[in-house]
Structures are given as C-alpha cells and as structure tokens.
Amino acid sequence: MSAKWREQWIEAVSQIRSDLGYEKSAEQLRALQKTGLLRLTDLKNDPAKFFEAHRLLAHHAPKLGPGFWIRFTVHYNLFAGSVLAVGNDQQVAQLDDIQQKGLLGCFGLTEKLAGVNSGGVVKTTAEWDDASKEFVITSSDVGAHKNWISQGLVGELAVVVADLHVAGKRCGAHAFLMQLRKDGQPAPNVELGDMGRKTVGNDLDNAWIAFHGARIPHSALLNRYGDVQPGNGGTYISKAKGLTNMGMIGQRLFSGRVAVAWAALTFTRKLYEMTRQYSDHKKCWAPKGTSNLTSVPQLNHLYARADSNLAQLESFVGECERQLNDCLRKDEIPSVALQEAIACAKIVASETSIDLCFRLKQDVGSHALMGDTGFEQMDFLQACKFAEGDSRILMQKLARDRVKTSKAIGSSEEQRLTAELQAALKGGAQAWDENFDKVYDLAWHVVTRNIGTLCPGATLRLPCGLSKL
C-alpha cells in the first residue's frame, strides 16, 4: 500500500466519533466506505491493506471504545468477506454496488442457545419451497434467535447462516445474502430487537433477530460451493468435492482472528503510550527534590515487560498475517498448522493484553479512575476475548487436538500433560472437565510452541488467570 493511501486513511478515521447514537455512528461507516479508500473486495485483492486499515483504526480504540471498530470489521470482514468466500461471481460483483450506495451489512450466525458454541449449533432453518422457488427462513424457537448481531438494527443487508433443508433432507449450514431492511423497516416476517445497554460501545447497535417464515429468492443462496436445483421438490448439488459452504464461511474466522489479535495489541500499545506520557510528567515527592511516577520501580518494570511482550507478539501475529495473506490472495484454505497458529495468535494477543492493561491500571494509581484516559474503554479487550472464537473454547480445541495426537511433540512438560490427559480419559469423558486445569495448561504449551515455531527465541509468561482459577 502507498504512503499516500496510509495518510488518507489515517485522516479519514481520525474524524470518527463515539459520542453518537448508533444510527449516526452507522452514517460514519457509510461515509467511510463511500470514499473507496478500502474496497469491500480488498480482503482478497489486497489483504495487507485490509489488515493495516484495521490496525490504524484500532489506534483510536482507547478514545473511541470498541463500537466503531466492531461495526467496521463486521461489515468488511464478516459480511463482505463471507460473500467473497462463498458467493458466485455475480454475487461478489454486487459488493461494488453495495459500497457505492453506502449500504451496510451484518452477519447472522450467533444464536441465543449456541452462545460461545456459535457455528457448531445452528437451529435457524432455510426450507426450500420448490413451488415458489424460494427459501423460507424460520427461527425454530427462541433459542434459534440470532443474538448479538452487530449492526443488526441499521444494516440493510445480512448474511444469514441457516440449516438448509431440501425435499425433506438436511444439507447443513449455508449462508444467504438477504435484505434485512427495506425503506427503513424490517423486511416482512423479520423481527428485530435491541440487546440493550452495554458497559462500552453503545455507539454500536447489537440486535437479536427472529425469522418467522421470511421468504427470500433462490438467488439469495451464496452458492459457490453448493446450490439447489429447482424441480421435483428440489435437488441439492455440491459443486466442489471436499468443500462446504460452512467450511468456507469459517475462513472469515481466520482473517477475523488476525484482525482481533492486532486490535488487542494495538489498543494495549496505545494505552501504554498514553499512560507513559502521563507518568513521565507526573511529579512525585522524593527525599532529595522530585522524581516522576515512571521511576517507581514496579511501574518502570511493567513498561519494560509490556514493551518486550508486545514486540514478540507483534512479530508472531505479523507472521501469521503474512502467511494468511498469501492464502487469501490465492483463494486457498490455510494449512492446519497455520489455522492452529492463528487461533494461538488470537488467544495470546487478547489474553496478554487483558493482563498487561489490568496490571497497568493497578500500578498507575488514581489516574486510571479518570475519564478520557483510555482505562474506561478496557472492555474493548473483553470484546476481543470473545470475538471470533471465545479464548477458552479455542484453548479447549487446541488441547483436544493435541490429546488426539500420539506423536512426541513439544516440550517435556507438554508431552507429560498430554500423556496424563490421555490416561485420564480412559476412565471416561467426564475426566476432561475434572482435569480442566491441565487442559488449559496444555493449551498454553501449544500456544507457546506455536509462537516459538514462527518466532524462534520468543519468551512469554502465562497471563495471570489464564490457566488457574
């Protein structure tokens, strides 16, 4: 990307405000995308620019909070990125028109019952009606209501994930590009509700969405990898062996996890920078004259530790991004090793950031209680912890995958924990929950091994509370 583009983007996002209602906040995103500085197709065509745009926006997070950053990434990564991943050429071409008109989209995956298991549980159904050549989208019960859908109260469009049924047969979760709102009102048989006031980010609308037999055309199915052939009740067609629509939708989790990792690290860097500016100039009494707050030993040590940890993690996340960018440009699925590394990046970036910022809050004194210091926006990191895969769930997966492997991988401690869990599980599946502390310990060893593989020589301490309760 050019220096000129970077300057233009920095100037554009510097004008963003968070002291607005969600409707006016949405107007800011409409205006930003209309500039064309970042195309809705750049995730594939220029992924380095896509991630840089996220990083530069995250520089403002200690002032703005999480609202606009989430709004932005939902539109560019989850909504547009899903169309890029599983849409046909005509559907992808619609993104240019969407951008030109300033329309906004949301991503309807998460459901109330599924919670942190979103993606693994999809109860919303899409029944093919062969007579009308339409899909009928229905929330099977309250647990199937789409939940915490960012931009759901203002977006005109939605990528909705539903369990496809054709001629009485389940075909699995598929994505549909549908009109969510028309002339400012919900589309027919679509019900919307506000999730309510949050601790931070109230410039972002979060909605629950219920579908009561909403009808959408055949063309709404994002059908690059699977389609429905009308006639005789309808026939499901798999268009690519070994690939599924849901599997390709999951690709957005990889780009999203890298973006979230960068956001957490960038927030932390900026909060430390802002606080260091304060502590360098905050005079303190000393036996001989005056000193400054930065010279207090524990705070000075924390600054040094944070700088070292952040530098290592920035190198690690940067390498994950570099490898992922190559996959995105080639339209290839990341290797299993890269998928694991990206999960590790999201975990360690968000958890380390939470740990470092909490410690800073404890050591900088009453300054952390003041408004406009950035500390009031620390729940930005809470959003990072749960976004694009809850950190605990990802750690469970890392540990499960490791236990399934009989190879002698990793340090002696990783191998010991693996063997102990393998032995415990012979007594029944309940042993997994009974040994949850070992599960998380093992996951952390997998995380640190992945960091060491991509960034030899890295040394990171376990963030407080990540393994032990």
Image (cartoon, helix red, strand yellow):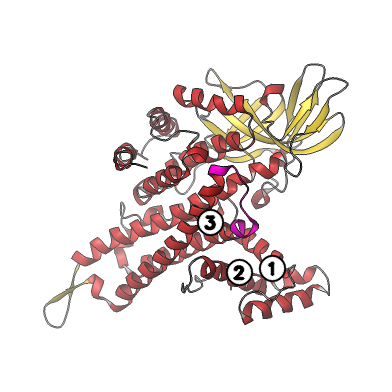
Secondary structure of the residue carrying tag 1 is helix
Judge depth for marks 3 and 2 and give the one in front: 2
Q: Earlier in the sequence, mark 3 or mark 2?
A: 3
Q: Earlier in the sequence, mark 1 or mark 2?
A: 1
Q: Is residue 244 left or right of residue 295?
A: right
Displayed quadrant of residue 278? bottom left
Regarding residue 466, the answer to whether it shows in the image is no
Task: Identify which residue is drawn at 27% across, 76% down.
Answer: 296
Indicate which disc residue 402 carries: 1
Q: Earlier in the sequence, mark 1 or mark 3?
A: 3
Distance between mark 3 and mark 2 Cα atoms: 18 Å
Task: Identify which residue is drawn at 36% across, 39% down.
Answer: 19
Distance between mark 1 and mark 3 Cα atoms: 22 Å
Amino acid type indicated by mark 1: Arg
Check the image and report above or below for 204 versus 381.
Answer: above
x and y, in percent, of residue 466 in the image: 55, 68
Task: Identify which residue is drawn at 61% across, 45% down.
Answer: 332
Look at the image and tell me in which quarter the C terminus lies.
bottom right
Crowd tier of the residue under label 3, counting other residues whose Cα lies within 10 Å: few below 14, some 14–19, many 20 or above: many
Amino acid type indicated by mark 3: Lys
The region drawn magenta spans 329-340
Task: Identify which residue is drawn at 62% across, 63% down.
Answer: 395
Q: Which residue is mark 2?
A: 446
Q: Is residue 52 left or right of residue 420?
A: left
Look at the image and tell me in which quarter the N terminus lies.
top left
Q: Which residue is mark 3?
A: 385
